[in-house]
Every structure is written in structure tokens, then in C-alpha cells.
Image: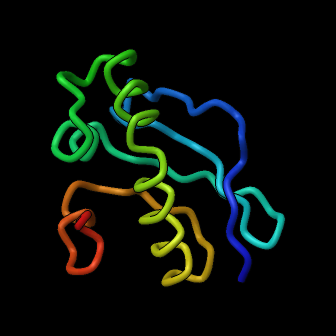
């Protein structure tokens, strides 16, 4: 399975308090998300406001994509929601 990420801008979802972004799994788009809680806990977002979450996403994009790629690989390329606990899993914490 080949996983890359689209260069389109992420979008804020105020109903779910999440940021949505696109992954490409074998060239097919898959919508993935990261929760506001994960962005606050692990990427320094000071609040769940749109601009705070988007700034935190931009600052942590490399790690977010790495964890997302691992999750996509594990679930066979289905959409994933990255929640705070996932970033605490052994091997996914930064060194």
C-alpha cells in the first residue's frame, strides 16, 4: 500500500472539533481527521478555535502525517480519526 498526503489545505470541522485532511492511499483520496483534543494535548493548540487548531496542525504536520500513515497501514487504508491517545502509543511518541 502506497500512502502519501494531498497538498490541499486542511479544513476545520466545528461540529466535531476536528481538522480534516486528505491522504492518498494507492492514489485514492481518503479523508482523515485529527481531534482538537489531540492538537491541544500534543501540538500546543491553546484552544479548540479554528485558527488555533490550524496553526497547531501546521506546526505538527510531519508527525501527524507519520502517525496517520501508520494508522492507515494498520487499518487497510480506511479513513482514520487521530485521537490524543494514539499519540501516546509506544513507538509513536517523539524521541
In the shown orientation, is residue 45 left or right of residue 18?
A: left
Q: Which residue is at a point 47% across and 75% down the rendered structure image? A: 70
Q: Which residue is at a point 46% across and 33% down the rendered structure image? A: 58
Which residue sits furthest right? 27
Q: Which residue is at a point 64% across and 30% down the rendered structure image? A: 9
In the shown orientation, is residue 15 left or right of residue 38?
A: right
Which residue sits furthest front? 95
Up-down: is 47 above or below 10?
Answer: above
- How does the figure colour the protein chain or chains? rainbow
* Front one among 33 and 16: 33
Up-down: is 77 above or below 43?
Answer: below
* Front one among 94 and 19: 94
Up-down: is 14 above or below 31?
Answer: above
Residue 49 location, x and y as percent?
A: 30, 17
Residue 50 location, x and y as percent?
A: 38, 18
* Front one among 46 and 34: 46
Q: Which residue is at a point 75% across and 56% down the rendered structure image? A: 29
Q: Quadrant of the C terminus?
A: bottom left
In the shown orientation, is residue 28 left or right of residue 33?
A: right
Looking at the rendering, which quadrant does residue 76 occupy?
Answer: bottom right
Looking at the rendering, which quadrant does residue 92 occupy?
Answer: bottom left
Looking at the rendering, which quadrant does residue 35 occupy?
Answer: top left
Q: Quadrant of the N terminus?
A: bottom right
Residue 77 location, x and y as percent?
A: 62, 74
Amino acid at each position: 500500500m502506497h500512502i502519501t498526503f494531498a497538498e490541499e489545505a486542511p479544513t476545520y470541522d466545528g461540529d466535531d472539533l476536528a481538522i480534516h485532511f486528505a491522504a492518498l492511499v494507492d492514489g485514492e483520496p481518503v479523508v482523515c481527521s485529527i481531534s482538537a483534543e489531540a492538537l491541544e494535548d500534543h501540538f500546543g493548540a491553546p484552544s479548540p478555535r479554528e485558527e488555533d487548531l490550524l496553526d497547531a496542525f501546521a506546526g505538527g504536520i510531519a508527525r501527524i502525517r507519520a502517525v496517520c500513515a501508520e494508522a492507515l497501514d494498520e487499518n487497510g487504508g480506511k479513513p482514520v480519526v487521530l485521537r490524543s491517545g494514539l499519540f501516546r502509543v509506544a513507538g509513536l511518541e517523539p524521541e
